[in-house]
Image (spheres, grey):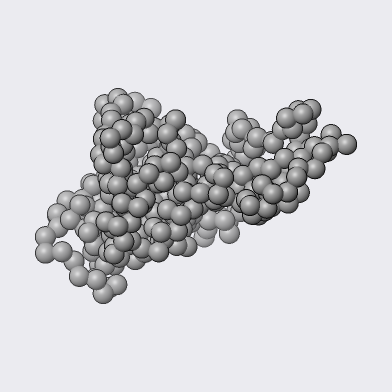
Amino acid sequence: MILLSSLIETFEAEFLERYQDSLLPSHRQALAAMKHCRTSHSPVMLAQCDDCESQRYVPHSCGHRSCPHCQQHESQQWLERQLQRQVPAEYFLVTFTLPKELRALAWQQQRTLYDLMIRCSWETVKTFTQNDPKLQGNAGAITVLHTHSRRLDYHPHVHLVMPAAAIDRDKRLWRTKKSKHNHKTYLFSHKALAKVFRAKMLEAITQAGLALPDCYPGKWVVDVKSVGRGDKALVYLGRYLYKGVIQEKDIIACRDGQVTFRYRDSKTQRWQTRTLPGVEFLGLILRHVLPKGFRRTRNFGFLHPNSKRLIGLLQYLLGLNPNQAIAWLRKRPQLKCRCCGGTMSIVKTRIPPSFALETPMPTGS
């Protein structure tokens, strides 16, 4: 397996020389963090066995949300929180895509455009839910922003996971849409969603004081897909939530200054490969680093964290046990002792690597 840190070590100097004038501070921070993640240059932790008291140093992860090594536990926690809010209804994955004519504007105004995409996608399904004759209530949704295609090209879009259900607070009613034809539930028309989303986005961009391009399409693309209970869709979204846009196992070659990685084609579901110069590969990775502090995922409506009591009441009245939804999730692996196989606990963190090399390791009793 080819490590991303080794690729950064190889191509960083040339990359910085070529792109130093166009790099954002968030790009430089991500590059530095991923370069030293779990290497001999990173800080270490001191771990001690609970049984035999033997100790050893463990390298720190960088903790950057774009690093393929880091924040597996955070991804797991996010997935657990979403599954614990499950409601008894059929779930849908709705994808709102920004047209290519607006991608240059999105790149120049990332924080503003990304925020507008998330908010307008939510406002669109919220409006449809309120006006739907079978729902007529408040919707709930989980939104996740992605900026990449499977080829890692710049392709901003918002995935929205929502149940085909609504809450009428005035009448205290819980309404759902059920399957009709061929055991499939019809949520909303994707063409109608696209029209409303387009109108909301164009109006929001204008109100933000940004100039629209001279030419943009009249028809936008929104995809609506049934995802059953929603757990598989959430697992898919959680995979790219914190751990960057590529897994290191998918980087398959680095030869003659060229990097080759694999990806699964969305239409054929077959594995494809892409080869490009190492400097361009680093640029491709950093292009998807979000602005500092920007939240990629948000919850809206009755799936907002503030509605925890309401969700608990719904689950109780409708006989849904949220613990069953997370029973299949794997627990966080424990650090094991090399001497006796016991569980090790972290007793000290952020130890400089130079200090760890110079200090003799304490022996177990």
Q: Nearer the viewer, residue 336 or 148?
A: 336
Residue in the image at 15% along x and 64% along y = 213
Q: Against 338, is 241 above or below?
A: below
Q: Is residue 127 visible?
A: no
Image-quadrant location for residue 223:
top left
Q: Determine the residue positioned at 17% across, 55% down.
A: 101
286 w.r.t. 183: above or below: below
Q: Is residue 295 left or right of residue 182?
A: right
Q: Could you tell me residue 365's position as x and y percent?
A: 88, 36
In-front residue for pair 278/93: 278
List x then y, in percent, for residue 229: 49, 35
Which residue is nearer to you in this view: 262 or 162? 262
Name of the residue lying farthest toward the left: 215
Residue 54 found in image quarter: top right
In the depicted view, which residue is nearer to us: 77 or 298? 77
Q: Quadrant of the N terminus?
A: top left
> Which residue corresponds to the image point at 76% horizontal and 49% vertical from the top-left?
347
Q: Position of residue 126 (x, y in %)?
A: 39, 56
Q: Is residue 365 left or right of residue 169?
A: right
Seen as rendered, the residue at the extreme right is 365
| Viewer can see residue 170 | yes
Q: Position of residue 286 (x, y in %)?
A: 36, 52
Q: How many marks?
A: 0
Residue at the spot 45% in from the left edge and 37% down from the top edge? 3
